[in-house]
Image (cartoon, rainbow, N blue to C red):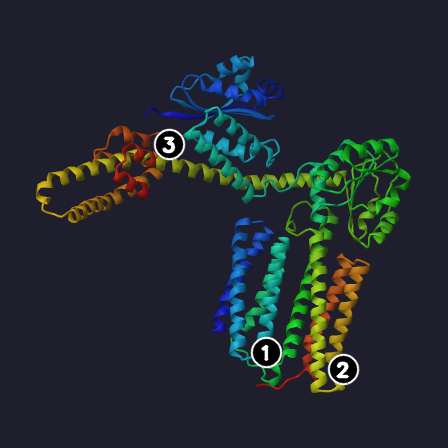
Amino acid sequence: MHLLWLRVAAVFYCVACATTLPAVLYRRPRLQRVALPATLGGFFFHFVAIVEMLVAARHWMPVGMHEVESVLSILIVAAYLIVVFTYRATGFGIFALPLGLLLLITPAMGRDHSTFSSPMIRSGWLFLHIGALLAAYAALIFSLLSSLLYLMQEQRLKRKDGPGFLAWLPPLAVMDTIAQKSLVIGFPCMTLGLLAGSLIAQESVGAGYFLDPKVMLSFAMWALYVAMLMLRRSVGIRGRRAVYVSGLAFIVVISVWAANLLSSVHRFPGP
Amino acid sequence: MKPTNITLWGVNHKTAPVEVRERLAIDAASLPELTRQLLGAPGMQECMVLSTCNRVEFLTLTESAEPDLLQFLERHFDVEAKTLSPHMYTYREREAIQHLFRVAASLDSMVVGEPQILGQVKESFAVARSVGAVQASLDKLLRMALVVAKKVRTETQIGSSSVSIASTAVELAKRIFASLEGKQVLLVGAGKMSELAARHLLQHGVAPMLMANRTFDRAVSMAQRYGGHPVRFDDLHAHADKADIIITSTGSHEPIFRREHAQKMLQRRRNQPIFFVDIAVPRDVDPLVNRLDGVFLYDIDDLQSVASSHLSERGKEAEKAERMIQREVDRYQQSLRALDVVPAIVEMQRNFENTRQAETRRLQNKLQSLSAEQRSAVEALTRGLMNKYLHQTVQAMKLAAKEGDAATVKTICDMYEIDPSAAEVVRGNAARPSAPSAIDLERQDGTEADAELKVGL
């Protein structure tokens, strides 16, 4: 049944994407009135689908690839909705909604065969590990997105353009706040997620887990996160430099994700 | 009912030079009296007078014979008719409605999209209502004009961008800082334009401004005027990093703010953005400053060019708004036509009800054996049948009225032997005042049949 709800959510997100793009780019307030309810509708069905999916799989955390993608997608849409309701910055939807939809398409296509079953997946520590890290990834994606939009607006203001294609961009201060807050929210999530993962690995693998490439990359990602947060706080990096740092952090996140292939600790038997 | 006409007369910035417009200018205090006097003109049923810097317009609803407005103006404004007549325009019926909608939506303004006109129309409307010059017909039309104007504002970007230098500077500041609440502004030098920009910024809630001037006394007097803090010119760079927005307009021949100054300011501000508005000629801020990340510099030409691009953007939006106005005028006229057949429908309903009651009376003897409950069932049955038979005819009549198909309406009226005077109203123009509503008729007649008709309408 969850597949049906996922597909319904995907249809809602499609409508939201198709209406948000012209609503924002060509300033069509009428379409905006369709876009937001469509996003909320998609979010509702997406949430129902995830709950059903996890209940059916008899665990309370996303472990299979489809589950992870689906949860990351809903976190991105949730972050977008928070941004819209707090800052009225609907421009974020141009990127956040298609990204959310893209992450949802594969899970909505069919059943996941690459999941695994392990007694560990009912452990609270693993729940904390996966949940907190996914929230941290969503925060990082939003921070990068805000920094990119900041750079676009900064360049536009420097070029002294009149109203044009980029007139929808939110004010610099709004994007700076979103980038900053995303990082601040993401940091404890990432720290908690890595701590929980370390404890699990310590229990199951022993001290040797630290030499695993996936684990090493994860800690490099955390260190970069700390550096990025400190730089923003102390020097106040914005614009181009903020995009470079956030971009680097994002590449590391992708590498950490991909490092499952090289990891011996972070590899689990199939079903 | 005598036929009536809607007419809009007037002069505006496009048709009359200021020498003519100023002779017709009406101040707020004398507007009610003038409206009252216009209402007293022969044949006048309702009227409204709109007077702004750019226009003086008279919206009138009259009986067939139009009053001589030129004579009225000659009498009240001490201006000869032959001076006025080349500049006057007169719009009737649909054109008058369209012009009114365009004026309220700011499409006929000197600066298209300016927001003041809507408030001025509202004020004139309120004055005309207070003296009893606006009643059912113009009330409906003017309310519609206000609704359309608001719709144009929400559904197009006609008023979203600033077209003056000062408001453009404020808008740009908002693109950087989002809200200007509590932002620090430094005003360097004095000048009309910079003071205007400062006033705009103050309206948006900026913190008490810092005022710097080569003559400290002038800085003090400006600070007193705007509730700010004076700064000695020698201390300018020591205070500059506190400011989020710096407006400069000095007579200096050398730049006051150079790249190295801006770099230091950025460091001290931990790279928080700075917005320079340089209104001075020659410029007070070195253009190289704009190359620094986090610094935004706009000189007078930049502001002018952004304001002009906003203006051309408004032109594009105005085209969209014009199409909206056309649609709204059509809708308004359709709604009037649909209302115009109400008396005919009510008459038809009344005829049917009379026939029904007569037939029931005729059979009264035969129905005597029935119980009270059975009699009321018969009553309900006959009324139900009557309404069912009438429903399609009423729908056809409403549709024909909506489409302006007077011939079909007339045929239906003839078929049901409806009083021609009731049917006549549909043949007139759409701008005519609406016929009494079904609810009004229900109140007069008090029959249950009319109450049912109200639901159908």
Q: Earlier in the sequence, mark 1 or mark 2?
A: 1
Label 1 is found on which chain of the structure? A
* Residue drawn at point x = 49 percent, y = 38 percent: B147
* Residue drawn at point x = 76 percent, y = 60 percent: A242
* Spot occupied by residue B229 in the image (x, y as percentages of width and height): 82, 38
Q: Which residue is mark 2?
A: A210
Q: Is residue B69 visible?
A: yes
Q: Which quadrant of the view contains residue B339? A: top left
Tag 1 and tag 2, C-beta contact below 8 Å: no
Q: Which quadrant of the view contains residue B412? A: top left
Query: Mark 2: few, some, or many residues within 10 Å (few <14, many ≥20)?
Result: some
Query: How many angstroms separate mark 1 from mark 3 (CA)?
Result: 69 Å
**Residue flagged by tag 3: what amino acid is it?**
Ser
Q: Which quadrant of the view contains residue A270? A: bottom right
Relative to B389, A55 lies left or right? right
Query: How many angstroms separate mark 2 from mark 3 (CA)?
Result: 85 Å
Query: Mark 3: few, some, or many residues within 10 Å (few <14, many ≥20)?
Result: many
**Residue flagged by tag 1: what amino acid is it?**
Gly
Quarter that holds the C terminus of chain A: bottom right
Tag 2 and tag 3, C-beta contact below 8 Å: no
Q: Is residue A94 visible?
A: no
Label 3 is found on which chain of the structure? B
Question: Which is more toward the observer, B92 or B353?
Answer: B353
Q: Which mark is residue B434?
A: 3
Q: Which mark is residue A213?
A: none
* Spot occupied by residue A249 in the image (x, y as percentages of width and height): 74, 68
Query: Mark 1: few, some, or many residues within 10 Å (few <14, many ≥20)?
Result: some
Q: Which mark is residue A64?
A: 1
Q: Secondary structure at mark 2?
A: helix
Q: Are the residues under marks 2 and 3 on the same chain?
A: no
Query: How many angstroms separate mark 1 from mark 2 (CA)?
Result: 24 Å
